[in-house]
Structures are given as structure tokens and as C-alpha cells.
Amino acid sequence: MIDGHVRGARFHRTRAKSLLLAFAALAFVLQGALLSPSLFAQQTERGKELGKRVKCMCGGCNDSATGCNHTGGSFSGPCDTAKGMQKEIDERVARNESDDLTLQAFVQEYGPTALIVPPARGFNIAAWVTPVVVPLIAFVLVWVVVRRWRQKATLATASGPEIPAEFLARAKRETGRDYDE
């Protein structure tokens, strides 16, 4: 009976240790999941909007930091670069930095290609306007040139060197017809 009592106590201690270990492992996993930056990434609407204006700089896509989604293979979802950019955006939003200051920080770190839509200043304006304006100007220019050509194109009268009378008389004789001049 003492032997059975010892076995029962040992069983309860082992079971208690197993439950305690399982609970500690579960708490560790939940803590990691709750504190993970990917779960907190882009929780604010302002953070989402700023993330759409910044390009993911991973080099594998041309998406925004918010829209980065690598599909296929064993990995699907935002890359680590996009997650880091989203985290930085959220930190700046939490510090209540202005949108321009946040975007400027990304431009300083990654260069002007970090922005999905570059600012409308200097050369950037020319880069946006030129593809629209140049074909319109070319169309108008071609239209004007064609109109001028059509106005200048008048029918010319048929003229040429004077035909000698003896050639005309010979032609009349050979054809047997009389033509008025």
C-alpha cells in the first residue's frame, strides 16, 4: 500500500510538472505572438495610407510597403523588408510625426525611389507631363502641316512645249480624224 501511495504521488508530481511545462511553453508562444511586430503592423488607418505611399525596397517586387505580398513557394505574404518598413511607419505615427516628415525619412534612407509617386517638383513634373504633352504637340503639328499642304495643292494646268504644225497635220492624216485645237 505504501508502494502504491508513492507511485500515485510520483504520478501526480510528474503530471503537475508536465502541465506546468506545457503552460509555460504556451505562455512563451503567446507572448512571442502578441509582441510580434507583424501583428501590430499597420493597425492605424494613417499608417496604412502612409504604407501605400512608400515602395517596398526588398528588390523582389514593385509593391507598396503595405501591399507587398510575395506569392508562391514556401513563403507567401509581406517580406521582412516590408514588415520592417511598416513597423517604422507605425512607430512614427505613434510619435505623431507628420506624413511629410515620415516620407522624407524614407527618402533619406532609400533615395527618391522609395516613394510610389514622386513629389511634383522639378524634373519629376517633366517626367509626368512629357508622355502626354509631346504626342499632343506632335499630333497638332502634323495636322497643321497636312492642312497647309492641302491648301497649297492646286491642280496645275497641263502645259508643255508647243507642238509644231507639221506634226499635228501628220497626226490628222494618219488617224483620219479632224481635231480642233
Image (cartoon, grey):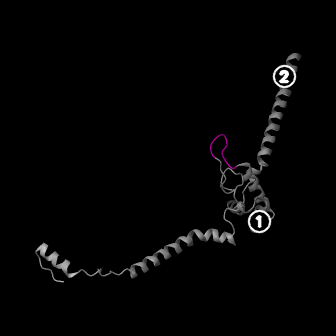
State the residue lying farthest toward the front: 166
| Neighbours of disc 2 within 10 Å: few (<14), some (14-19), many (20+) | few
Please state the horizontal and vertical placement of residue 177, each as a whole percent of the image. Answer: 11, 76
**Is 143 contained in the magenta span?**
no
| Residue on which disc 2 sits | 8
Instruction: Find numbered disc 2 in the image and state the secondary structure of the residue it sits on.
Output: helix
Please state the horizontal and vertical placement of residue 90, each as a whole percent of the image. Answer: 76, 59
Number of callouts: 2
Please state the horizontal and vertical placement of residue 40, each as a whole percent of the image. Answer: 75, 53
User: What residue range appears in magenta?
Assistant: 71-78
Name the mark nearer the viewer: 2 or 1.
1
Amino acid type, callout 2 = Gly
User: What predominant SS class does the magenta segment belong to?
Assistant: loop
Amino acid type, callout 1 = Gln
Residue 14 occupies quadrant: top right
What number is the disc on residue 104?
A: 1
